[in-house]
Each structure stands twice: as C-alpha cells, then as structure tokens.
Image (tube, helix red, strand yellow):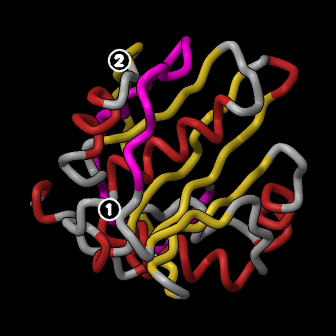
Amino acid sequence: MSVRMTESLTHLRVDISFLDMISAQSSPARSLPEGWSVESDVRLTIGDYRALYDAVGRPWCWWMRTVMSDAKLEGILSSPETRVFLLREGDDVRGFFELDVQTAWRRVNIAYFGLLPEAIGCGVGAAFLRHAIDAAWSFRPHRVTVNTCTADHPRALPIYLAAGFRLVQVVREEWDIPASLNMSLPVHLR
C-alpha cells in the first residue's frame, strides 16, 4: 500500500502466521447457539463492507482494506472468487468471514474471519470458524489456508490450530499504518 510521504505513520512490527489444512474435518460440526445463524454468499455494498470490516477489525489493526480505493475493493468484492458470509444473532450481524476461492490452484483462503467486539466471549467463535472451514471445503479444494498475525486477537492462532490447521510459516512484516486512520494498537501489543 502506498501512503503519502508527508503523512504521519504508526509503525508496527507483526509476525504473520500462515496456516493450512489439507483434509476436511470428519468430526461433526459444533452447532451455533440457538438464535445464531450464518448467512451465505452475501453481496454487500462498498459502504456496508467497509463499515463491517472496520467494526470487526479496528481493534486488531485491520487497516489495509480501509486505505484501498473503492474501485480496487469493488473489484475484489464483485469477483466470482470472493464469497462473504455473515454471522447473525437474530437479525443483528455479529461477524463475518470472507473466502477467496482460488479454483486454478484448487485452494480456498479464508481471507478474513472475525467477530464484532460484542460477540467475542459469547461462545460462538469455534462454531463460526467451523462454518468457515466447512464452507471452504464445499468448493472441493486440495487445501484450505488462513493467516493471522500478532496484532490479531491473542486467541486467533490457538483457535486455528485447535480447528485443525497446521502452521506452515511465520513471516515478520513492518507495517506503517496511516495515523489518519486513528487506530489504537491492540492492548497486547502496547
């Protein structure tokens, strides 16, 4: 991402963990609590997507799509490879996941997965992740991938590992987050 050189930046060093899964889960999926559901293959407006992305990701420094142009983001969201799913409690959205279905490589990447702050700690994370994993495997890939980083919720990596992903690689990145985004560093990184 290019940032104007005169803009003030917040520098953050993160370790990105790349994970994969090479076979679908054989155990039965854990059910979501009563009143919770997953809405499949949702098409959101750019504004609605940005609001959801920010609400879920701001506490964990999700910033890259925030600075992305509307045209580029529209290209991603309108692509047949991109699938967005919403977690709902009744009619209220409580989280989302986004799949990047890479048919040429027979791979599905869980590009984004997260809960709104009010849904964290409600006991839905593992069941919602299983929905994401099962949705990814429904495309019959050879591999399902996901990544997380040290800026994410501290339970992100352990929950991916507990779900059956294996750690493939860890890469250190230096992020320069535009200060104009007004993002606070996650508590565990301060």
Residue 177's disc number: none
Q: Which residues are magenta?
A: 2-31
Taking the magenta stretch, the answer to whether it contains residue 135 is no
Q: Amino acid at mark 2?
A: Leu
- Mark 2 lies on residue: 167
Residue beneath the point at 30% across and 56% down: 11
| Front-lying residue, 100 or 159 | 159
* Pointer 2 or 1: first along the chain: 1
Residue 75 position (above or below residue 87): above
Q: Amino acid at mark 1?
A: Trp
Residue 60's disc number: 1
- Residue 147, percent from left and from top: 45, 35
Identify the image quadrant of the N terminus. Answer: bottom right
Disc 2 to disc 1, C-alpha distance: 20 Å
Residue 78 position (above or below residue 103): below
| Front-lying residue, 116 or 54 | 116
Q: Is residue 33 visible?
A: yes
Residue beneath the point at 76% across and 36% down: 101
- Snapshot quadrant of residue 19: top left
Mark 2 or mark 1: which is in front? 2
- Residue 45, percent from left and from top: 78, 80
- Residue 95, percent from left and from top: 47, 68
